[in-house]
Amino acid sequence: MDSLRDTFRDSHEAADQLAESLREHVDETAAVVALGAGSTELADVVAERLGMDRLRKGRVPRTVVIVAERIRRIAPLDALIARLLHAGAERLVIATPLAESGAAYQVDDRADAFVCLRRTAQLGRIGAWYDHWTFGRGRPSARVVPIRKSLRAVV
């Protein structure tokens, strides 16, 4: 990652960076859930990169990774957090490529771990943060090795 560059090359680069940053916070027993329909593709790609399952109805694992395309307001996140805790989740990891600073501080207070790649006072148009908006699985990306028990012993 080029630390001097504010934008992502494309949405797959953002997913790759999120997956890589999440590795230290989760293991293979965690499941991924999207924060709203707009985050579904990002959540799918992050789950795929990490070799994790998407959250299924009826079974909530101990650790849940909430993936958001962006976080501007805290209310939608609070509602999802309440549902997950009520369903039995014990540890919540929240991951997003983009967040407004004020909301990010609030998320930090609610999450067991928070991965945010870019923070700013105001996000504006989400497309302005990407050189090319490419969501869908059209571009192959760098391979992120899935989390496995055998690898955890090495790390």
Image (tube, rainbow, N blue to C red):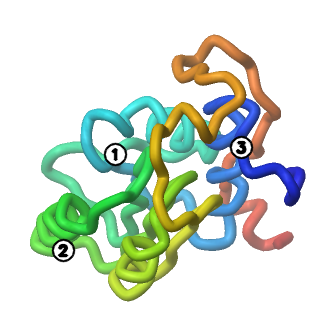
Residue 94, position as x, y percentages in the image: 44, 65
Question: Is residue 150 at all visible to an observer of this figure?
Answer: yes
Tag 2, which secondary structure?
helix
- Answer with left or right where residue 108 lies relative to residue 130: left
CA distance for labels 1 and 2 = 15 Å
Give me the residue at 64% from left, 60% from top: 117
Tag 3, which secondary structure?
loop
Name the residue furthest bottom: 109
Give me the residue at 38% from left, 87% from top: 109
Give me the residue at 33% from left, 34% from top: 38
| Mark closer to the observer (1, 3) | 3
Residue assigned mark 3: 7
Residue 98, position as x, y percentages in the image: 53, 54
Tag 1, which secondary structure?
strand
Inspect the image, locate mark 2, and give the three-letter code of the amino acid beneath it: Leu
Residue assigned mark 2: 85
Q: Residues within 10 Å of mark 3 (few under 14, many from 20)?
A: some
CA distance for labels 3 and 2 = 34 Å
- The tag earlier along the polypeptide, 1 or 2, is 1
Name the residue furthest top: 138
Residue assigned mark 1: 34
